[in-house]
Amino acid sequence: MNNAANPATSNCLAGYVLAGGGSTRFGQDKALVEVGGKAMLARMVELVREVTKEVKNRRGARKYEAFGVEIVEDRCQGRGRSAELLPRSKMLLEVPCGPNGI
């Protein structure tokens, strides 16, 4: 495959893991819950890194810094849009951090 066409190597794709919500229905912080011995946030970061080197956590609290991703705060608390943070030359991949699909 031509590297220019591969988002993971061409840096045209930015990945955002959405973690840091209230987890009110779940009852505890979903990002920190372990599934198969690994925190859900760590699992999601690994999955997104399979397709892009640029992985950030939108809405995340500073407590997630240990997961090795940049924390990007919402501009409008709880209603931020990651697309507003990107240069026009980038594509956006947003994935939730939760038990869906695990």
Image (cartoon, rainbow, N blue to C red):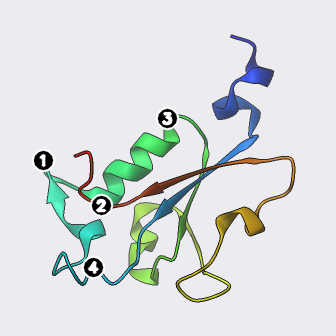
In front here: 21 or 4?
A: 21
Which residue of the protein is positioned furthest toward the left in this rendering? Answer: 36
Give yes or no for contact between labels 1 and 3 (Cβ–Cβ under 8 Å): no
In three-dimensional space, the C-alpha distance between marks 2 and 1, rounded to whole angstroms, equals 14 Å
Image side of residue 98 versus residue 84, left or right: left
SS of the residue at dot 4?
A: loop
The picture places residue 53, in percent across and down from the top left corner, at 61, 43
SS of the residue at dot 3?
A: loop
Kind of residue at disc 3: Glu
Q: Earlier in the sequence, mark 1 or mark 4?
A: 4
Q: Which of marks 1 and 3 is nearer the N terminus?
A: 1
Residue at x 64% of width, y 33% of height: 8
The picture places residue 20, in percent across and down from the top left corner, at 40, 77
In three-dimensional space, the C-alpha distance between marks 4 and 2, rounded to whole angstroms, equals 9 Å
**Residue under pointer 1:** 36
Residue at x 27% of width, y 79% of height: 23
* Rendering quarter of residue 42: bottom left
The picture places residue 98, in percent across and down from the top left corner, at 29, 61
Give yes or no for contact between labels 2 and 1 (Cβ–Cβ under 8 Å): no
**Residue under pointer 3:** 50
**Residue under pointer 4:** 23
> Nearer the observer, disc 2 or disc 1?
2
Give yes or no for contact between labels 1 and 4 (Cβ–Cβ under 8 Å): no
Q: In which quarter of the image is the N terminus?
A: top right
Kind of residue at disc 4: Ser
Badge 2 crowding class, 10 Å Cα cut-off, few under 14, some 14 to 19, many 20 or more, is: some
Badge 1 crowding class, 10 Å Cα cut-off, few under 14, some 14 to 19, many 20 or more, is: few
Which residue of the protein is positioned furthest toward the top in this rendering? Answer: 1
Q: How many marks?
A: 4
In three-dimensional space, the C-alpha distance between marks 1 and 3, rounded to whole angstroms, equals 19 Å
